[in-house]
Amino acid sequence: MSQEPLRRQTGSVQLGPGVGRHPSREIAQRGPTRAHVAPVRTLAEAVAHWARTRPSQPLFYFADLEEKLTVLTAGDLHHNALRIAAHLHARGVRQGDKVVLSFDTSPEFLESFFACGLVGATPCLIELPSSKVSVRAWGERLRVKLRLLEARAMLIDPDFADLAHEALLEPAAEPGHPAPFVATVKELAGEAPSFEPPTANADDTAFIQFTSGTTDAPKGVQISHRALFANCAAMGEISQWNSDDLMVCWLPLFHDMGLVASTLASFVHGIPTALLPPFGFLLKPARWLWAIHYFRATSSFAPNFAYQLCVKRIKDAELEGLDLSAWERAYNAAEFIHADTVRHFTERFQPHGFEPDTWRPAYGMAEMVVGISIRDRNDPLRMETISRSALASKRQAVPVHESGPDALTVLSVGRVLRGIDLRIVDDEGRELGERQEGEILLRGTSLFGGYFKNPEATGAVLREGWLHTGDLGYLAEGQLFICGRSKDLIIKAGENHHPYTMESAAAQVTGVRAGCVAAVGVNNLQTGTEDIVLVCETTETKHDVLRQQCKHVEEMVYQGSGVRPNRVIPVAPHTLPKTTSGKIKRAYIRQNIEAFENLSLLVTPPARQSIVH
């Protein structure tokens, strides 16, 4: 077996004005055929299947921060993954063992991920340290997860291997369980004894992904190969993926939308994916759009804030020559979808070939692999204007005129995928009718296998075969509309208010950072109800300007949501705690609101300290 990985370095690419097309995408394939999931049962079998049937086809393109472009063909991916698998086997990793993976977006990550499947081990995905989390906090979280998993090995990006070794200086496993060995892919080089990959079952765990929730207790979502393939097939079916499609992804690969929706779903259909590091997008959002241009990409997933960031951050000069006309599916998921974002993005980028029909609003969660509903191509993009007051007081979605002061615009997230059953229920568990808001319950072929070694958490959400999502929504003519999270609801004077509309309105104020606003309900013992408090990150620093800004936020929130906040707390950039997938930790903020008040830019505490989360 070759000692060196087989990868094709195809030079560099500057994703910006002046870039052409990748040679393999210059001419669209003639007569594309419908793409289907590989006729296999597991990811390991899929790797071998594509290597056998189309070894020279590029499956993954990597454009790193240094503009280097790397291509992995199906044959090279299988060769490299098999080499790593042989080394893991030689070092004692066996079928059923847990192997922790902690990488940035790279060929090494995907080769290691598929290597785990080839050796019969279960890959367990963990984020790398980042600016959002201190190294010490990352090390503590790592030890907790390693103890939970009783991991046999940990493969990590070489830049962070020393940190992993330091974290393991303290006991990483329960007594009687040895600590895992830590290695980089480069260290798993040289000749390794050949081995016979074990036979896996469709009901075996394909991977374990940790939820990015707001609690400190990690919950490992177990996904079987059977559930994974069923969900990927259903997404491809409703999206009508074709053989000439290509996916672009800048999302983190340790979360479901990056790993499954963008990468594995394409992979099992034999569709290539172009991958960018997440930091590259955040640093320069235009790189994402230029990657779509360069690869003539047809599909890409992103949360709402990413589309909003493109509207606000990309300068006109960065768009010269941009062509988005090949983009057929702009999936918008993972967080509340704002109608204004959809309108503004369309208006800004329609002159560059982006069409309104490209939008694919979607809804999903890791406990259902990833996909739950997606807008069907045959359905028009559907927006509804409903009464805020009726939703707040009666929990009914009552249509009203668009321009009225009581108007709230919501987007359909499409139809439920094949193989998934959905119910909307009230607080007592009774099924609700059309246009009545309640909790979303799910079951079906994509259902997860429970949280790893956490029956209590599993039992809290999985009851009588139904997954209790904690999300609120309603059905109308077969389409699903999401209203928010039950735990994020603000209940003021007996009325329910969702935070998303208030946060979106506040973000329109100059100086307030988009995606960095939290609306929470805080108990007020004097009034006997909740105060509405907005915590906003801002780039402003002058007290007079901040006071005016807070008044402006208050007014914009009132105009945009019909409710006036009790307090507005301006804080410095990067103050609000977020999950590893970028979601605001509203529960944490609500529980620690006094600490955020002390961090307000309008007060000067004796000793300002950052909040460790």
Image: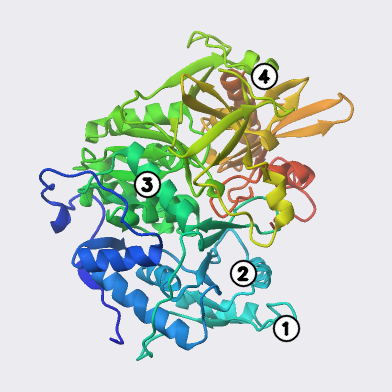
- Residue 517 position, x and y percent, is 60, 38
**Residue located at (62% from left, 67% from top):** 138
Mark whose residue sits in front, 2 or 1 = 1
Q: CA distance from mark 2 to mark 1?
A: 28 Å
Q: Which residue is mark 3?
A: 233
In the rendered structure, which amino acid carries the disc numbered 3? Ala
Nearest the viewer among 110 and 141 is 110
- Residue 12 position, x and y percent, is 22, 65
Name which of mark 2 and mark 1 comes first in the sequence: 2
**Local secondary structure at mark 1:** loop
**Local secondary structure at mark 4:** helix
Decide if residue 611 is in sight here: no
Q: Which residue is mark 4?
A: 392
- Residue 346 position, x and y percent, is 33, 30
Mark whose residue sits in front, 4 or 1 = 1
Name which of mark 3 and mark 1 comes first in the sequence: 1
Q: Is residue 134 above or below residue 438?
A: below
Asked if labels 3 and 2 touch by Cβ distance under 8 angstroms, the answer is no
**Residue located at (40% from left, 83% from top):** 86
Q: Which residue is mark 2?
A: 135
Q: Which residue is mark 1?
A: 176
